[in-house]
Every structure is written in structure tokens, then in C-alpha cells.
Amino acid sequence: MEDQYVTRRSEKGNVLFLILIAVALFAALSYAVTQSTRSGGGSADREKSILSGASMTQHPTSLRTSVIRMILGGTDISALKFNAPSEAYFTAGTTDTTELVFHPDGGGGLFQQAPADVMLGTGQGDWFFNANFDIPQIGVTDTTTSNDLIAFLPGVNVGVCREVNEELNFVEDIADCTSADGVIPDVNAGITEANIRENQDNVTGFPAPANQEDLDNATGTCTAFIGHPSGCFRDDVTGEYVFYSVLLER
């Protein structure tokens, strides 16, 4: 009987110990939630920007896979076309559907707009795909053949742009750039909005070398873009924040 009494008393002690641990953990959790609530909207806004930035960067990544699949399947790089499914050019008989990135016969890529929560306004954003620019030290860098195939998303929310650049270590390379906040570089005024918002669709081949321009700063000394296949910049002319992502380096 004495052994049973000692055992049960030990069990009660263990249960009491577990209850105390549970109470302590609950108190710690409550404190953490309270502190998070007291921190205000700034923390919540940053969390939202981080999540939105992640969703924004995923789309070009999936399209890069589609583009590489097409090239490995025999489609010439200069024949890639980004026509939307709603365009007449997209229908069979109008063109070779194997050259269309968003067609099942071609890349089978998902055509979609950017979600509204990454944009400055209230609506969804439009992606643009062209080879008008070169990212230094991505692929080959020269004056004739090194323009990369890039996805652009103009009109991005500044908070999302800032978080993306911090995640991509742009901050470390922006010291010699013109920048309002030290996180997002301003681009050369020569990088026109028309060239950013041009789609490579039913045109033949990549643009002539004359249309090629490095993504750079107005001072010509900005190193923020060097070796960065993705990032955000501010268009000096329009004031828009633009996200870019290289789909195919050349």
C-alpha cells in the first residue's frame, strides 16, 4: 500500500509540473500576441508587404520554366511570343502556336495579372515582357547581343518594392546610386516608359542593338543592378516603381 501511495503522489507531482509548464507557455504566448497588437499597423503592413512581394516574384519564376522548356524543345529564342490568350494572334491558324509562351502547344505558361495588393492603385497590374534592356553581368554583357528577356511590372506599391529589394540585398549595392530612400534606385531617364511597357508578341526576333540599354542610374555609376536578375527601381520620369525579373539571360 505504501508503494502505491508513493507512486500516486509522484504522479500528482508530475501532473502539477506539466500544468505549470502549460500555464507558463500560455502566458508567454499571450504576451507575444499582446506585444504584436501594440506594435500597431506598421508591423502588420510590413508583414503584408513581405507576403505580397513573395507572391509577385513567383510568377516570373514559373514563366522562366516555361521559356526554358520551349527552348529545350527546339523553339528559337527570337521566336518567343507573349501574346495574351484574348488576342486573335493567339488562335490556331494565325501563327505557330508552339512559339506562344502562354499557349498549351508552346510554353503552357499561366497568363495572369499581378494581384491588387502589390500595386499602388486598387486594381490588378499588367506584366510586360521584352528584351529591350541588359542587366550587367547577367549572361553576356556587350553592345550587340546581350539584351536579356525580362518581365516588368510597373506601378508596384513602394512598400512591396522596398521589401523585395531588402530581401535581394539591393541595399548593399546602392550606395553609389541616386535613391530617395537608399533602398530603391532611380533609373536613367533614358530608360523610357514605352520600352518598359512593350510586349514581345507578334514581332519577329529580339530588338535591334540600338534599342538595347543597360538598367542603370542617372549618374551612370550605379552598381545596384549588377548581377541582380530581379529587383525594383523607380522610374525617374513617371515616378512609378517597377519590379523586374530576368526570364532568360543572354
Image (cartoon, rainbow, N blue to C red):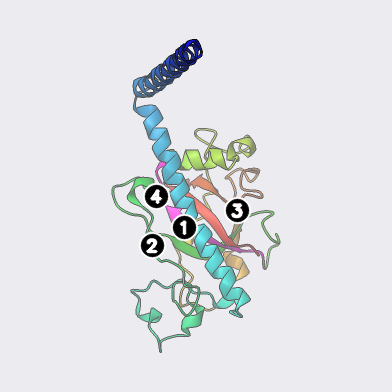
Q: Position of residue 108 (x, y in %)?
A: 47, 72
Q: In this figure, which residue is indicated by the disc labeled 3?
A: 229
Q: Are marks 4 and 1 in contact (CB under 8 Å)?
A: no
Q: In this figure, which residue is indicated by the disc labeled 4?
A: 155
Q: Is residue 134 magenta?
A: no
Q: In this figure, which residue is indicated by the disc labeled 1?
A: 59
Q: Position of residue 49 (x, y in %)?
A: 42, 39
Q: What is the distance, in whole Å, between disc 4 and disc 3 at their CAs?
A: 19 Å
Which stretch did the figure color magenta? Answer: 145-158
- Foreground mark, 3 or 2, reads 2
Please state the total of marks drawn on the protein image: 4
Identify the element where label 1 is drawn.
helix
- Foreground mark, 3 or 1, reads 1
Identify the element where label 4 is drawn.
loop
- Foreground mark, 4 or 2, reads 2
Identify the element where label 3 is drawn.
loop
Q: Earlier in the sequence, mark 4 or mark 2?
A: 2
Q: Are marks 1 and 2 in contact (CB under 8 Å)?
A: yes
Q: In front here: 18 or 144? A: 18
Q: Earlier in the sequence, mark 4 or mark 1?
A: 1
Q: In this figure, which residue is indicated by the disc labeled 2?
A: 112
Position of residue 40 relative to residue 59, above or below, is above
Q: Label 4 sits on what residue type? A: Gly
Position of residue 42 relative to residue 109, above or below, is above
Quadrant location of the C terminus in the rendered image: bottom right
Q: What is the distance, in whole Å, between disc 4 and disc 2 at their CAs?
A: 16 Å
Identify the element where label 2 is drawn.
loop
